[in-house]
Image (cartoon, grey):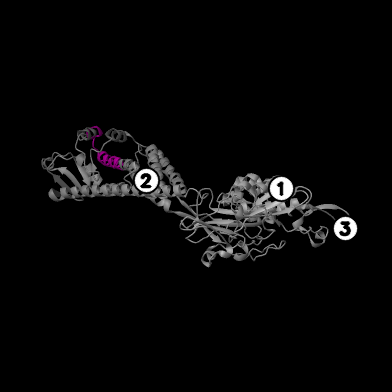
């Protein structure tokens, strides 16, 4: 499709250039050469490829998304799956209809081309012929206008035998035959069959045929015939019956333009000037319509990892990673069933993606950053897309990790850039991977009825909860010195946010950061000289950890045995309390809904001096 669009634009530009600068000039042989060579170039230039080799490093496949079943039996459910299918069907149907129309046009115009050829052959076969030195005169019984097809010149038999055909006419038609104008016409006719829907080819044919008439007229006048007499003779054929499009006819239209060109004389200086103008035009055409092809090769040179931070290469096993995952499976009857990882059969377990691992640190070079300023690269810094000029604000040592990946044609940003570069700053890398890979504690919803699995996430809910969590986590005192009540709330919120983040889509994750561990905040310390300083708890060395008092052991939660819904609600409302259901902080209204199935719930609690934390979970 892109190729045909380039051909259409190219032929239009060539024709416009010809009409504006060349058509009215008395350089007819050069114009013929230009029209034929330009149309060949228009078809060849889009096929010419300039190759550029780009070295990219092996992509570090770091899985940061919710695991998905990657077997054909389990694919992601899009929210608008039904409408998407309809759109695809409609597009495919329209494509089929358009191809059918195009092929029908090709068949029709091919048939028309062969009919015209057959009629010419029939006239040659059935008519009397007279041979000259170079050509064959076909003598017709009817009063057709003189015309030419290759070496055959068609004339009225009665007029020829009566010696009534002017010498100018014979010279005119011999010029068509001797200069092989029929080759040009046949070429254009074939292109018209292929591009029958494109009007530009019809206009191009008119330009070619009109120039043929200029050449034939020039041949007549160069023999010394009087211009005015010749023009009057041409006017006598003006109302004659038109011939097939495959032939060159003496009465071809645009007589007025032919008369104007007969009178015009182009100076030698102007001829050279116009000829030289064609050269930059062709060069510009070649530059504009060539195809740039980028070959991406993996750079085999080894990058030495920076070992200033330990980065364990071994990821969790599936058993470790999915042990806390809940699988909600809809069977073929539409009923939903909840399963733990331990209850899944081996077939489904094998289809789960392997757990993510922590990548080895890799720092880009100065040359890398300079190369990536090119618009062929899409620059993503800490999962956010930036303009390439943003790289000028960074030094190579500001990054801990980078990776590259080639975009395919169906990618969302393919028209913007062709290689995606992911860069992670030192702070982002530390926050992302310092805690290592954690077991996934969310849900995977699998629809066996439709052979799909879906993972949903709500970005705004996540943003709101993350804001409240960060306010509580970073408030004084440090997490280790907070009360048991606050610690329990922060820990439960952290688990909830981990699950929420895992359910976000890749696009949503690019807009937010994952939740930080409760202890991932500054703690006040004193060195040997008595100087006070602050440091992230997760980066403390052994001597510094000894300054931090270990947290007291938490008391195990108690089981609430009360079964009366009204008494439970009264109990929850009578004191300061925080209620969690599956690691999610819920309201009293939500509790009322859950208590409708009290016999299926288990309620536990931890009493502290600041209040009570209740945990509601399903018995199953």
**Image location of residue 336, percent across then percent down:** 51, 56
Q: In this image, 550 relative to 421: left or right?
A: right
Kindly state the secondary structure of the residue where label 3 is placed: loop
Kindly state the secondary structure of the residue where label 2 is placed: helix
Front-most of residues 285 and 268: 285
Q: Residues within 10 Å of mark 2 (few under 14, many from 20)?
A: some
Compare marks 3 and 2 and give the one earlier in the sequence.
2
Of badges 3 and 1, the one in the foreground is 1
**Residue under circle 3?**
528
Residues marked 3 and 1 touching at CB (< 8 Å) = no
Mark-to-mark CA distance, 2 and 1: 88 Å
**Residue under circle 2?**
34
* Residue drawn where x is 24% and y is 48% of the image: 113
Front-most of residues 256 and 555: 555
On-image quarter of the C terminus: bottom right
Q: Which residues are magenta?
A: 208-230
Mark-to-mark CA distance, 3 and 2: 89 Å
Of badges 3 and 2, the one in the foreground is 3
| Residue 389 in view (yes/no) | no
Residues marked 3 and 2 touching at CB (< 8 Å) = no
**Image location of residue 300, percent across then percent down:** 58, 64
Q: Residues within 10 Å of mark 1 (few under 14, many from 20)?
A: some
Mark-to-mark CA distance, 3 and 1: 43 Å
Kindly state the secondary structure of the residue where label 1 is placed: strand
**Residue under circle 1?**
577
- Is 476 in the magenta? no
Q: Main secondary structure of the magenta part?
A: helix
- Is 215 in the magenta? yes
């Amino acid at each position: 499709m892109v190729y045909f669009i380039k051909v259409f634009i190219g032929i239009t530009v060539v024709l416009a250039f010809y009409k504006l600068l060349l058509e009215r000039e008395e350089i007819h042989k050069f114009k013929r050469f230009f029209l034929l060579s330009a149309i060949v170039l228009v078809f060849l230039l889009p096929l010419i490829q300039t190759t550029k080799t780009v070295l990219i490093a092996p992509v570090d496949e770091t899985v940061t998304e919710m695991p998905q079943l990657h077997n054909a039996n389990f694919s992601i459910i899009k929210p608008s799956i039904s409408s998407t299918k309809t759109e695809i069907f409609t597009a495919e149907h329209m494509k089929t209809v358009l191809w059918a129309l195009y092929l029908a046009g090709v068949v029709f115009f091919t048939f028309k081309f062969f009919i015209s050829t057959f009629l010419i052959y029939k006239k040659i076969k059935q008519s009397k012929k007279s041979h000259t030195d170079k050509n064959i005169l076909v003598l017709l019984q009817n009063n057709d206008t003189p015309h030419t097809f290759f070496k055959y010149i068609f004339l009225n038999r009665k007029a020829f035998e009566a010696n009534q055909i002017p010498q100018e006419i014979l010279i005119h038609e011999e010029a068509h035959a001797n200069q092989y104008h029929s080759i040009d016409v046949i070429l254009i006719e074939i292109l018209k069959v292929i591009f029958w829907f494109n009007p530009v080819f019809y206009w191009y044919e008119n330009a070619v045929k009109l120039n043929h008439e200029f050449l034939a007229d020039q041949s007549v006048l160069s023999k010394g015939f009087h211009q005015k007499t010749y023009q009057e003779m041409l006017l006598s054929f003006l109302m004659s019956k038109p011939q097939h499009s495959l032939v060159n006819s003496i009465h071809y239209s645009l007589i007025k333009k032919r008369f104007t060109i007969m009178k015009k004389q182009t100076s030698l200086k102007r001829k050279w000037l116009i000829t030289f103008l064609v050269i930059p035009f062709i060069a510009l055409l070649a530059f504009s319509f060539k195809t740039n092809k980028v070959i991406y090769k993996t750079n085999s040179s080894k990058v030495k990892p920076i070992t200033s931070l330990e980065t364990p290469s071994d990821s969790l096993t599936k058993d470790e990673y999915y042990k806390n995952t809940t699988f909600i499976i809809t069977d073929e009857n539409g009923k939903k069933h909840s399963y733990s990882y331990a209850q899944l059969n081996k077939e489904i377990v094998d289809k789960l993606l392997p757990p993510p691992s922590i990548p080895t640190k890799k720092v880009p070079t100065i040359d890398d950053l300079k190369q990536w300023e090119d618009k062929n690269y899409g620059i993503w810094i800490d999962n956010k897309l930036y303009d390439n000029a943003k790289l000028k604000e960074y030094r190579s040592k500001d990054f801990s990790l980078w990776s590259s990946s080639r975009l395919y044609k169906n990618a969302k940003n393919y028209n913007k850039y062709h290689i995606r570069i992911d860069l992670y700053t030192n702070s982002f890398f530390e926050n992302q991977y310092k805690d290592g890979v954690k077991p996934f504690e969310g849900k995977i919803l699998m629809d066996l009825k439709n052979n799909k699995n879906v993972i949903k996430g709500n970005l705004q809910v996540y943003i709101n909860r993350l804001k409240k969590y960060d306010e509580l986590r970073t408030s004084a005192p440090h997490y280790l010195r907070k009360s048991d009540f606050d610690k329990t709330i922060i820990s439960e919120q952290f688990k909830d946010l981990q699950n929420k983040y895992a359910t976000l889509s890749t696009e949503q994750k690019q807009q937010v950061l994952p939740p930080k561990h409760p202890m991932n905040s500054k703690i006040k310390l004193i060195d040997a000289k008595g100087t006070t300083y602050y440091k992230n708890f997760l980066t403390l060395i052994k001597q510094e950890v000894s300054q931090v008092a270990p947290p007291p052991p938490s008391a195990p939660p108690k089981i609430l045995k009360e079964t009366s819904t009204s008494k439970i609600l009264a109990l929850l409302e009578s004191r300061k309390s925080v209620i969690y259901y599956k690691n999610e902080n819920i309201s009293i209204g939500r509790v009322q809904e859950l208590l409708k199935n009290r016999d299926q719930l288990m309620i536990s609690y931890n009493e502290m001096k600041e209040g009570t934390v209740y945990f509601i979970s399903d018995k199953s």
